Image (cartoon, grey):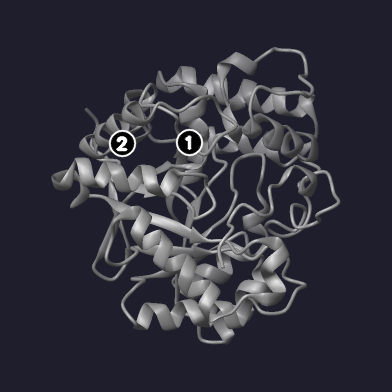
Amino acid sequence: MTEVPRIELAPGYTISRLLKGGWHLAGGHGAVERQAAIGDMAAFVEAGITTFDCADHYTAVEELIGDFRAAHPALARRNEVHTKFVPDYDRLARVDRAYVGGIINRSLRRLRMERLDLVQFHWWDTGTPGFVETALILQELKQAGKIARIGTTNFNTARLGELVEAGVELVANQPQYSPIDLRPEGGLIAFCQDRGIRQLCYGTLAGGFFAADWLGKPEPHEPFANRSLTKYKLIIEDFGGWDLFQDLLRALDRIAAKHAVSIPLVALRWVLDRPGIAGAIVGATSARHLAENLRVFSFQLDDEDELAIRTVTDRRTGPEGDCYDLERDKEGRHGRIMRYNQNVAG
């Protein structure tokens, strides 16, 4: 089995370059059988994908990882867990120390950890004051020993700069990044590289659209089989539409054939090779594609491959703006599908 490379995310702290995502276990992607999911987590760690990504508002996922850690203590010692702090949209104006501390303590209990490896901070509406002050509360909890490291998710470059300017010590940022969503290249990655903030990317497989199953197929429309397809079909429309996406799939397919791998592995390899990228998060409801995903480390893209991809992506019309700017519009096409108040606490 291919060995999974590791990377130092912060001094003395390494992670696997592929991370097991938890969103797909939170509902909207089919039924989850608890014991099977715990067994799958064990398989991921044994295979070298030791770093899990989850969130306080991913329904029941922190508890599921905590149960895995309790059932497999030896594997738990090899397991890094990255969670998120995502205050409810309706609570933003009233976030205080008690609220933040309550959610962090709840994550510790759910995950059965004494200290959280990485807490990634999200703030739904950066037009609502308080996100800088809230990040500083997280830093106080870090100093108190409840959090080992702090990161962010879905902040644009300007707002990330406000956190850095305020003295928040960030080691990682989690943006949406793939060949159909190049918004991080607009300035965010360069900003982070200058400050030692590494990227942990999601959306790298466009919710499953980067697959041979979609090659040569007519454009699909809602309703979709799961929430991921709903989300990333909107990104495809912003990218330039279904015809341009088909051109990209054809380019990826030719590259995949050249290296004897699959289309999703080419897309995943492309993200892992970008500057400033520490790791890519792959959502999985099971270990069904585990062995296949590990093959991403069995090949390299060459200059010809990179040019073939860029020849298509240079024709894109979007997505426009900085990271998460489109999604932050609650009344817009992207914002309308979000679930804003899933973190009921305090």
Residue 212's spot in the image, x, y percent?
A: 57, 16
Which image quadrant is residue 247 in? top right
Query: Under tag 1, what secondary structure?
Result: helix
Q: Quadrant of the N terminus?
A: top left
Q: Secondary structure at mark 2?
A: helix
Residue at horizontal 72 percent and vertical 42 percent from the top:
314
Q: Residue at x 50, y 25 (%)?
A: 31
Q: Whole-percent x and y of residue 234?
A: 76, 37
Q: Quadrant of residue 47?
A: top left
Which residue in the structure is indicated by mark 1? 25
**In this rendering, does residue 197 appear at all?**
no
What percent of the width, then of the height, locates residue 85?
A: 52, 63
Query: How many neighbours does mark 1 have within 10 angstroms: few (below 14), some (14-19), or many (20 or more)?
Result: many
Q: Which badge, 2 or 1, is on the more N-terminal residue?
A: 1
Say which amino acid is labelled 1. Answer: Leu
Q: Does residue 169 sit above or below 79 in this rendering?
A: below
Q: Is residue 87 left or right of residue 76?
A: right
Query: Residue at 28% across / 60% down in the picture?
Result: 113
Against 2, is 136 above or below? below
Q: Residues within 10 Å of mark 2 (few under 14, many from 20)?
A: many
Residue that carries the numbered disc 2 in the rendered image: 41
| Front-lying residue, 253 or 35 | 35
- State which quarter of the image contains the C terminus: bottom right
Whether residue 126 is visible, yes or no, is yes
Query: Is the Cβ of the residue at disc 2 closer than 8 Å to that at disc 1?
Result: no
Which quadrant would residue 223 be assigned to in this image?
A: top right
Q: Where residue 191 is drawn, which disc sits there?
A: none
Question: In the image shown, does 243 or 144 lie closer to the viewer?
Answer: 144
Task: Compute the Cα span from label 2 to label 1.
Answer: 11 Å
The percent coordinates of residue 231 (x first, y second) are 69, 37
* Callout 2 amino acid: Met
